[in-house]
Image (cartoon, rainbow, N blue to C red):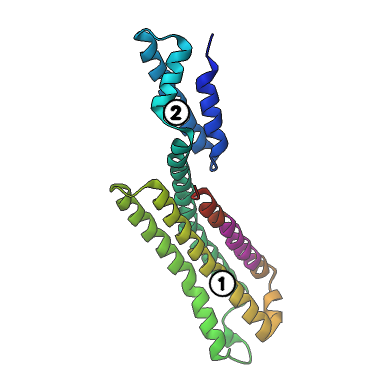
Amino acid sequence: MAGAGVIDEYVTALDRRLRGPDPVKDDLLAEARDSLHDAAAAHRDRGLAEEDAQRRAVAEFGPVTTIAREYQGLLGLAYGTRTLRSVMLVLPLAYVMWELNRAFWIGAWDDFDAPPPDWYLTVARFNDASAWLVAGAAVLALLVGRRLARTRVSTVTLARLAGVVAVVAVGVSLLGTVAILAATAYLDAARLFLSLPVTAASAVSLAVALRLAVLARRCVVFSSV
């Protein structure tokens, strides 16, 4: 069919400019393609040839750069929302898992000869609070983002907000995890290896924080347009 590739070329060019989760991107591209074909069909009904109808539909849809910016905002927002939900659920779960292992396999500091110094308790309290603080920040960001989405705030702005919150939240959590591991190693390195389950739980907690750090970085990348 003459001109059958005009819409396909437009969608392909749009696809090349978008970064983000494939399921969301595929849905956006399918929606764009369907809209373009519907518009082209309407122009054909008014007497335009196939190629002219498709070119008119593409022109009315908007420049690729403009549409890509709008769609990239949606992709960034979708990824940021998913990452914030992961922060909200996974970090507290990892912390609870570690605490249960520590309590069962090692016990409290009181079970050892010397109590920990005040500086260590400060680090421990920060680590204890960080999981719940970042989870609360993620919940607040999701609620505020949902409220702002009903206003005229652009999806690009919302995506950037989600990315910033995710980066800060994961950074705080990662800092708490590294700080307590480093403080324990400095004070009594043997405690890190007293129990294989606790060692494994520590490794999992660190791996979770690092993985979320990667996701948070992608939030910032995907919200850049």
Going from the N terminus, do you reach mark 1 or mark 2 first?
2
Disc tally is 2
Question: Secondary structure under badge 2?
Answer: helix
State the extent of the magenta-drawn residues as a range.
201-214
Q: Left or right of 200: which side holds 70?
A: left
| Residue 169 image offset from top left, x and y in percent | 48, 64
Label disc, if present, on residue 32 of the rendered structure: 2
Q: Is residue 201 above or below residue 41?
A: below
Neighbor class of circle 1 (other Cα within 10 Å; few <14, some 14-19, many 20+) is some
Label disc, if present, on residue 175 of the rendered structure: 1
| Residue 56 image offset from top left, x and y in percent | 41, 20
In this view, the residue in front, 100 or 36, is 36
User: Is the magenta region chiefly helix, strand or loop?
Assistant: helix
Residue drawn 54% across the image and 33% down it: 15
Neighbor class of circle 2 (other Cα within 10 Å; few <14, some 14-19, many 20+) is many
The Cα atoms of the two marked residues, 1 and 2, are separated by 43 Å
Quarter of the image for residue 100 reads bottom right
Question: Secondary structure under badge 1?
Answer: helix
Q: Left or right of 54: which side holds 195?
A: right
Residue type pointed to by label 1:
Leu
| Residue 147 image offset from top left, x and y in percent | 30, 52
Where, quadrant-wise, is the N terminus in this rendering?
top right
Residue drawn 31% across the image and 52% down it: 148
Q: Left or right of 160: which side holds 99?
A: right
Residue type pointed to by label 2:
Ala
Q: Left or right of 27: which side holds 196?
A: right
Q: Is 70 part of what is drawn in magenta?
A: no
Q: Is 211 part of what is drawn in magenta?
A: yes
Q: Is residue 171 above or below residue 60?
A: below
